[in-house]
Image: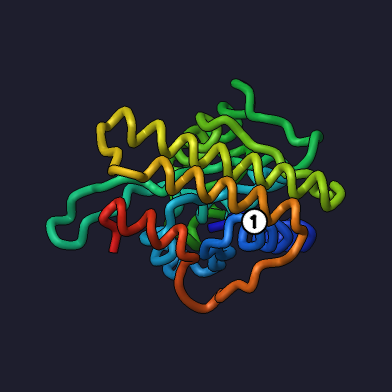
Amino acid sequence: LILSSRENPEDSCLGQVLLHWLTLLGRFPAAICSPKLEALGDQVEVAHHLVVLLTLGALEDPRFAAALVVGSRWRVNGGNRRKIEKCALVPIVTTGAFCFPDRAYWDKLENGEVISQDRLEFARTKLSQVGEAYKALFAVLAGKFTAHGSEIIQRTEVKELLDRQLQQREAVEDSAGNRKPALRNLRTSILQMVNRRDSELVPPQLDLHGGQCPEFSAIAAAEGSP
């Protein structure tokens, strides 16, 4: 899932550009976050990653903040209401002018000087929830996607993003002892596939309305996913 601020039309366009690269290079289902929080909640239930575009003014957008709160919640097992893993947050800096929060910023956020509580009432979201979601987001090392970069620059940045996410997931699985046989080879084949597609510069024939590519379907089967 890709989350961007809707205050600035350029940010929404940037989300579409990143969506294009993720489907082109990664060849797995990706989507823009729904503007409706209820629908977004359904999206988060089945998503593995929430890619958050850090643009100027995004942190002051109440709809962006409310959406991030929804995206950073624990998923719940419907059978016994047991909390399970969260959707992984992936912050992406899109401009060198973006300023990461400092201590003064956190104090202003808590005091309602960044976003007032009144502006969050539409989503029934509390400032404390926004603060927790923002801190969870900035606890993750941010990636980079150059908004006005060339095709080569953007392609390289997305390849690095995909590579890092695969490596991080492997590290989590290794530490938890959940590695399934041949899973590492499957992931390696995906990275090789991305590199081949990059060198060929030929857009893949994507089925955006159904299913994953064979490589990711194989991973899902190896992990025991439905």
Q: Is residue 5 visible?
A: no
Q: Looking at the picture, how far across and down is residue 41, in whole percent?
A: 41, 62
219 with respect to 106 (left or right): left
On screen, residue 74 versus residue 83, left or right, reads right
Query: As drawn, which residue projects farthest toward the bottom?
Result: 209
Q: Which residue is found at the position 73% from the left and 43% from the top?
A: 156
* Residue, far left: 80
Residue 61 in picture, x, y percent from top left: 64, 51
x and y percentages locating residue 180 in the rendered image:
28, 43
Q: Percent position (x, y) of residue 106?
A: 57, 28
Split into 4 quadrants, where in the image is the C terminus?
bottom left
Q: Nearer the viewer, residue 176 or 75?
A: 176
Identify the residue at horizontal 71%, vertical 42% (top origin): 157
Q: Residue at x 80, y 49 (%)?
A: 147
Residue situated in front as seen by the camera: 33 or 212: 212
Which residue position is annotated with label 1? 25
Q: Residues within 10 Å of mark 1 (few under 14, many from 20)?
A: many
Foreground residue among 215 and 72 = 215
- Number of marks present in the image shown: 1
Horizontal relation, residue 223 to residue 44: left or right: left
Say which residue appears at 57% left-offset and 30% top-offset: 141
Secondary structure of residue under mark 1: helix
At label 1, the amino acid type is: Leu
